[in-house]
Amino acid sequence: MRDKHRSRTAEVAAGARAWHLLHETPIVFRDPFAIQFTPRTWQVILKSPVLNWLMLASKTFDWVYPLRAEILGRARFTEEQLEKAIKAGIDQYVLLGTGLDSFALRRKDLPSSFKVYELDHPASQTAKRSRLAKLNIDMPKNLEFVPIDFEKESVADALARSSYSKERPCFFSWLGVTMYLTREAIFSTLRSIAAYAKPNSEIVFDYMIPKEFLDPFDMQMMMKIERFVARRGEPLVSSFDPHTLPHEVCDLRFELVEHLPPTEQQKRYFADRSDDLRPASFYYFIHFRLVE
Ligand SMILES: C[S@@+](CC[C@H](N)C(=O)[O-])C[C@H]1O[C@@H](n2cnc3c(N)ncnc32)[C@H](O)[C@@H]1O
């Protein structure tokens, strides 16, 4: 992403969560803070049923459904896995590339001993913090912000500047980020987590598969998303073969917990809908646990 600019795709993700809660049912993922995080002009569009109808009816925006399904599905999957980890005793959560994720604000029910670390690009994080200040939102005491550029710094070095405990396992999420990073930054981040985090730590992330794997319809859809994000200064950079990625990550001291291809996402989170909200064939979710 561009060095001095906040992430626009993070605003798109918040907009997608806001739109879903305002206009769609059944709810896949509930984020009541998303609407406040979206820029004012977006708020007007999101709240207008006529503008919404025009957007959805227009062929130009047919790629918006699969993009929104990815944003909602990955958040739902991650927080389901996180919930299980919390029940099993994990009490640290690191959101890598947090963007406008509102987990810490939504989960004030968690004890103050449960620590949340938001790691994000400095430009995005500064913008989020000033938005939070403007909104006068009471900040949870268990939340810490840690700036990082994954292309330039290791997660271990960033976490070493916080109260993160190396002595306890942690749950990491990395949502909507790998596609914007170089392969080197992705693998050095995973290596850093493997070296720094305690065994039994977990990570969930999403990734895109290469264009060449797609049929012509899905390839068109992906190229529309590619143009949309590139225009916002965040070009798609990395994609992975779903047959080889799990092995590559397991070589770093992880074990695969679950791999969720779009067909499974559809069955689990989007079955029985009467609208067109369904996953695209090119976004995969994956969950690993760190072993001894
Ligand atoms: C599409 S947003 C996803 C935000 C959030 N995780 C979500 O699911 O809504 C991409 C996020 O990745 C972050 N990001 C992109 N490149 C980065 C980098 N090199 N270092 C740190 N963060 C980065 C952006 O700041 C942004 O918050």
Image: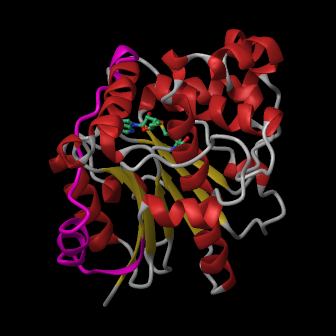
Colour scheme used in the picture?
Answer: secondary structure
Query: Viewed as shown, does residue 182 lie left or right of 14?
Result: left
Q: Is residue 47 at least partly visible in the picture?
A: yes
Above or below, 240 against 212 in this view is below
Quadrant occupied by the C terminus: bottom left
Residue 163 appearing in the image: no
Q: Nearer the viewer, residue 20 or 146?
A: 20
Q: Where 216 sits versus 119, above or below?
A: above
Q: Magenta segment, which residues?
A: 230-259
Q: Is residue 146 left or right of residue 28?
A: left
Is 36 included in the stretch rendered in magenta?
A: no
What residue appears at the point 65 percent right and 52 percent down from the top-left corner?
A: 143
Asked whether 130 or 44 is in front, the reply is 44
Depth check, front residue: 142 or 263: 263
Residue at 51% x, 40% y is 66
* Residue 257 x, y percent position in the rendering: 42, 80
Residue 72 versus residue 195 in the image, above or below: above
Q: Position of residue 224 (x, y in %)?
A: 37, 24
Asked if residue 235 lies in the magenta stretch, the reply is yes
Quarter of the figure with the N terminus: top left
Q: 59 or 70, which lies in front?
A: 59
Residue 119: percent from the left, percent from the top?
Answer: 47, 46
Q: Residue furthest bottom?
A: 292
Q: Quadrant of residue 24?
A: top right
Question: Who's the residue at 73% across and 38% down the image?
Answer: 20
Tell me which corner region of the image, top left, top right, bottom left or bottom right, holds residue 148.
top left
- Ligand 1: image quarter: top left
**Image height check: is 48 above or below 88?**
above
Q: For this view, does 144 lie left or right of residue 22?
A: left
Whole-percent x, y for residue 53 in the image: 73, 19
